[in-house]
Amino acid sequence: MKAAAFDFVRVKSLTEACDRLVDHAGAARLVAGGQSLLPAMNLRLISPEILIDIGGIAELRSISVEDHVLRIGCMTRHADLLCSPDIALHAPLLAEAIKEVAHPAIRNRGTIGGNLAHADPASELPACMLALEATIVAFGKQGERRIAAEDFFTGWYETALAEGEILSAVEIPLLAADQSCGFAEFARRSGDYAIAGLAARVSYEGNKIRAPRLAFFAVGDRPILAAHAAAALEAASPPYDEAALASVRAALAEDLSPQDDLQAAAGTRLYLAGILLGRVVAQMGDPRPLPRPVRASTS
Amino acid sequence: MSHALSLAVNGERITAQVSPRLHLADFLRETLGLTGTHLGCEHGVCGACTLRVNGEIVRSCLMLAIQAQDANVETIEGLSDSGEIADLQQAFEARNALQCGYCTPGMLITAQDLLLHHPSADRAAIRAHLSGNYCRCTGYHAIVDAIEATGRARMKKGA
């Protein structure tokens, strides 16, 4: 199908984009890469009156390391994240997750800001933001506002962005030398949306897991930090074998109440979440498939 | 709501007036008559409309024509006429890697994208790179064969 008719304006700054959003309150959508927005428009799920294109604002496409924080501009494309040495070193979880985001041609246009603002609960990156304790930067008429990733995703395709605000960047703490991360998902075909997925980060004290952050996706109306399972994992003792993980899996039922849909039943999703948990815990222990960072010099 | 558009298509400078709702694939097919770019699903799933914009593969059903302002667009017609993918096309023909042919332009462009960067890609890498291109005749095995053979031949030639 084709999108319904709409108008189009290209803006040169975030301030101008905010002004336009306010001018067309409720009737405008921002377009970045358009890889989620245009399918929805072609399917006539949404029909905005005007698209505000922020694709020409070059400074929004950036990856930088500042004050122990990795800052990623909203127009940074999935393909940029996949080949960035800074991402590989300081947030290898993102590089691993991006491999499961759609296909190469989509990753060449899709952006991190568009992905997060779209807030698809089956999407990989929102869960990564939770696992990595990211901060979402919202730009508005009053300036910048910082929102913890845990508070940002509020429901099916819903976020904490206010009317007229734009997701301008994300800030992610650099992975510490004692931290490790892991990622796994179930999808019927490569590049499909997941039926269930898990992005995780833990600290290690020797071979003991501390402070695990287990962010599940595609098992609810938003990415979910499994607090009970994390507490059970922290209470468990190494080696993290099937016996040790039994209590963690049992705790998952308190964290997740997945939906039934055409893809899978709720019980299947809960079961798959438990399987993913085992795989990701194994990944995060030795040998570690995701490169561990060299501690950044303090200079 | 008509907007001025200026871009390069297969090396030729084009100017036109377009409606914002017109996606790049329809612009190429309907306005320029370049019907080698095929449309299957029109929501980014099937890969039939894959082409190159500024040297990178994209879905032309998920890019508005107006977003291609100042871009360098290359379609299957351009890649064919320049001879860039002549060996790949020959390998597709030799291995019967096309049946109805509907997915073929997208397959060729996606395969060329992989081989340009990774001529030595193994079968798993080829399958991963092609995972967003559907062949409803299900001739995937022959397609992977043709791409693998082309990559090997290019490596040998380059060595």
Image (cartoon, coloured by chain):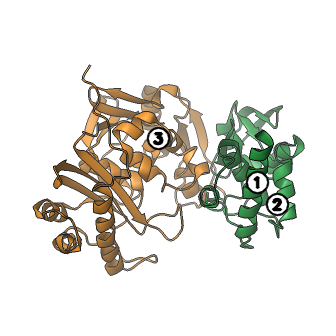
- Which of discs 1 and 2 lies nearer the camera? The answer is 2
Q: Quadrant of the C terminus of chain B?
A: top right
Residues tagged 1 and 2 counted as in contact (Cβ below 8 A): yes
Is residue B38 in sight in this rendering? no
**Palette colour of chain A:** orange
Q: Residue at x 62, y 50 (%)?
A: B62
**Palette colour of chain B:** green
According to the image, label 3 marks what residue?
A81
Looking at the image, residue B123 sits to the left or right of residue A204; the answer is right
Of all chains, the one bearing label 2 is B
For the residues labelled 3 and 2, the Cα–Cα distance comes to 33 Å
According to the image, label 2 marks what residue?
B92
Crowdedness near tag 3: few (<14), some (14–19) or many (≥20) residues, C-alpha within 10 Å: many
Kindly identify the amino acid type of the residue bearing the numbered disc 3: Leu
Looking at the image, residue B88 sits to the left or right of residue A252; the answer is right
For the residues labelled 3 and 1, the Cα–Cα distance comes to 26 Å
According to the image, label 1 marks what residue?
B108
Frontmost residue, A197 versus B129: B129
> Which mark is first along the chain, 2 or 1?
2
Kindly identify the amino acid type of the residue bearing the numbered disc 2: Phe
